[in-house]
Image (cartoon, rainbow, N blue to C red):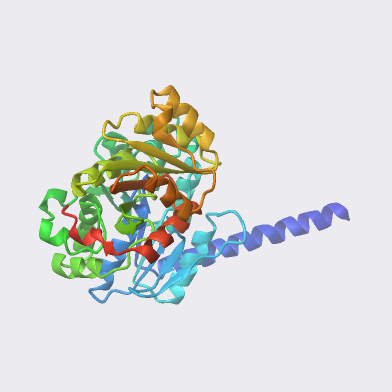
Amino acid sequence: MDILILVSFLILFLLICFFEKQRHLHFLQKIPVRIHINGTRGKSSVARLIAAGLRNSGIKVICKTTGSQASIILDETTELAIKRGCTPNIIEQCKVVEFAQQQTADVLVIECMALKPELQAYSELHLIKSTHGVITNCGPDHLDVMGPGVRDVALALAGTVPINGRLYTNEKTHLDIIDRAVSDRHATRIDIIAPENISYEEMHRFSYIEHKENIALALTICRDLGVDRKTALAGMVKSKPDLGAMDIKTIEWQGSRLSLMNAFAANDPVSSKLCWQQASMYTQQHGQKIMLVNCRQDRLDRSSQLAVMCATLSDLDKIIIVGCGRQSFIKTAIAQGISKHQLIVPVEQSPQMLVADIVELSVTSVLIVGIGNIKEFATNLLQFFEQQSLTNTAETIKI
């Protein structure tokens, strides 16, 4: 009798799974265009840009990002924050698909939320089945999960190439891996609009610091979906940026001028170094340049990688280390030849105390570039600068 009950429950479970799968496939078929976005950096920005460009032509778009803050974006002004009661799970994507179908969306733009290579592939092949795939780039991020090397990361990301779909990417170094996946899945890789063809005037219209490569990706997809460049760009310019979008806030504090560049969403060494170079290039006349690293206890390898990167910067005056698990960064930095005198490790981690520590350096103008992690301390610091801000210098930056 016990065996009969067990078999009955197993059959019932299998039937439920079958009908749930059929239900999900039905929802997918109701959404004509599904754009699945993957990559090591820029996913959330590209997702928002694509959605805004398409929406501005009258297309009904539902966009889901999982970057600095997981959100479902309905239009230029309405976002629904995703509240999770447990650890993020890729099954969340099924609920987003159902929601998009209920909203009668013409297009679903959805950011890949999986890290493990097998789950990235599963997300594409079973949960999204995209018509258009995006791999922004392949860099040294989450090497503990996708590594050990960057080519392993590229192999993992290639798992989201769509079957019989179109693939868009700015990646150049590991393009052979992506092209192999494109061939295996009978997809077509589309040439991207050259970033250098995006003019200074077009870049200057954005109220925050955006990358030409991200805009080029978004414009290419909008073009292929029938939206002209002028219409698409107009939508992108007026869209709300991601919480982690780069901008610069400047405050006056006890006689010192402090500029904070929000690059906290940059959490790998390649993009972090790029942000530092951009900051150095577009902000001049600063007495000191400080890197602010917000560490995470569960990303000790990342902290070590960022420390190695910081050791390669010749124009770095000080490094402030905040967050949790800071010892990993400190040990690696010293091992890489960074002087202990360059390191500042605040005892009390509050925005007010951090600003006070910087002012004590007795310089009249300081550039602070924040990297590593947008959560907790970084969020508080950004809010503090927002409240105290006198000038949003992003409007004067030339890209």
Residue 10 at what x, y percent from top left? 73, 55
Please report the residue visible at 44 percent of the width from the left and 48 percent of the height from the top: 373
Q: Quadrant of the N terminus?
A: bottom right
Q: Nearer the viewer, residue 3 or 244?
A: 244
Q: Is residue 256 above or below residue 81?
A: above
Q: Quadrant of residue 379?
A: bottom left
Which residue is rendered at x = 64% and y = 63% of the image? 16
Q: Is residue 231 left or right of residue 275?
A: left
Residue, far right: 1
Q: Which one is in front, 160 or 115?
A: 115
Q: Quadrant of residue 244?
A: bottom left
For this rendering, which residue is in front, 388 or 79? 388
Asked whether the viewer can see residue 91, the reply is yes
In the image, 139: left or right of 98? left
Q: Between residues 299 and 22, which one lies in front from this camera angle?
A: 299
Give x and y (percent) for residue 299.
51, 40
Q: How many marks do you count on the picture? A: 0
Q: At which x and y percent is residue 47? A: 33, 59
Query: What x and y, as percent, mark residue 249?
Result: 31, 58
Do we see residue 226 in this rendering? no
At a point 32% along the width and 73% down the height, the residue shown is 76
